[in-house]
Image: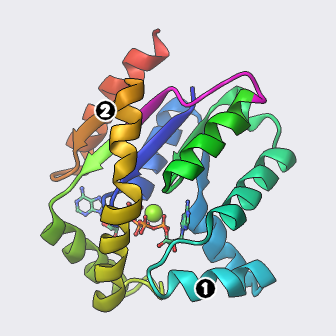
């Protein structure tokens, strides 16, 4: 089972991914975490990525796709065992590349879980986290840019996956438990197909 967890910055993708991994035993690929790890280690990719991340902009598709392809080369069992993609894809080009990449392993994206959260709640969560996260993008100016980028570049993926018939919208406001229960209904149904 390959799942995409989809949503605006601060919508709870990382938080819910942890629970999904625990229950469904999927591998977690968070492109944001991969990039932050490169930044922390001071790699060349990290330096390039940081210039985009701190501005709230997306890393160019080509660079991001190289990073993803690398993860699959190093972990060829992932596609067969199942992955939760967190923060990827973020553009139509990335979604198409992901399908192609998974097709090489005779698989595809099975379900996309979209977390819908009110905009003022997104801002509140990220500002709260910014007090201790050390993330260069958790400040009000960059948060506004990230939300703008999400609306312009990433939200069109809702329609893209809706047309494929595998987009499942979840109300991402409220308690962690309730949100997870709603996600689990979708994933259980998928698992039993
Ligand atoms: P990325 O790391 O993916 O960040 P993001 O999408 O902006 O989202 P966040 O990680 O901030 O939020 P989240 O949805 O994971 O929510 P979380 O669970 O943390 O990307 C960062 C940057 O990297 C991008 O801007 C871009 O530059 C680059 N990048 C990454 N992937 C890329 C790609 N594919 N292509 C190009 N560039 C890419 O929750 C947020 C906070 O709220 C937490 O503090 C949490 O504890 C809290 N919280 C969660 N759920 C609840 C709840 N139900 N109630 C109250 N609080 C909650
Ligand atoms: Mg995250």
Q: Quadrant of the N terminus?
A: top right
Q: Residues within 10 Å of mark 1 (few under 14, many from 20)?
A: many
Say which label, 2 or 1, has the lower sequence index: 1
Q: Is residue 102 left or right of residue 7?
A: right
- Residue visible at 71% across and 28% down in the picture: 103
Q: Which residues are magenta?
A: 104-113
Q: Is residue 2 left or right of residue 138?
A: right
- Residue visible at 69% across and 29% down in the picture: 81
66 drawn magenta = no
Which residue in the protein does label 1 denote? 50
Quadrant of the rendered image holding ligand 1: bottom left
88 in relation to 129, above or below: above
Q: Which secondary structure, mark 2?
A: strand
**How far apart are labels 2 and 1 at the CA level?**
32 Å
107 drawn magenta = yes
* Image disc number at residue 168: 2
Please tell me whether the stretch drawn in magenta is mainly helix, strand or loop: loop
Q: Is residue 22 left or right of residue 122?
A: right
The percent position of residue 85, horizontal first and vertical second, equals 55, 46
Quadrant in the picture for residue 41: bottom right
Quadrant in the picture for residue 108: top right
- Comparing 150 with 32, the one in front is 150
Q: Is residue 78 left or right of residue 83?
A: right
Q: Which secondary structure, mark 1?
A: helix
20 in relation to 130, above or below: above
- Residue visible at 52% across and 71% down in the picture: 58
The percent position of residue 59, horizontal first and vertical second, equals 59, 72
């Amino acid at each position: 089972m390959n799942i995409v967890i989809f949503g605006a910055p601060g919508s709870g993708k990382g938080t819910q991914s942890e629970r999904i991994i625990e229950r469904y035993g999927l591998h977690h690929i968070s492109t944001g975490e991969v990039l932050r790890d490169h930044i922390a280690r001071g790699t060349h990719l990290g330096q390039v990525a940081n210039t985009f991340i701190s501005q709230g902009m997306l890393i160019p598709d080509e660079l991001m796709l190289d990073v993803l392809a690398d993860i699959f080369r190093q972990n060829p069992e992932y596609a067969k065992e199942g992955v939760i993609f967190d923060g990827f894809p973020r553009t139509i080009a990335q979604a198409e590349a992901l399908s192609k990449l998974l097709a090489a392993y005779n698989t595809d994206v099975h379900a996309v879980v979209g977390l819908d959260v009110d905009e003022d709640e997104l801002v509140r969560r990220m500002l709260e986290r910014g007090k201790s996260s050390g993330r260069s993008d958790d400040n009000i100016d960059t948060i506004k840019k990230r939300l703008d980028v999400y609306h312009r570049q990433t939200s069109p993926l809702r329609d893209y996956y809706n047309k494929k018939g595998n987009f499942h919208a979840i109300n991402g406001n409220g308690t962690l438990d309730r949100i997870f229960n709603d996600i689990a209904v979708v994933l259980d149904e998928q698992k039993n197909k």
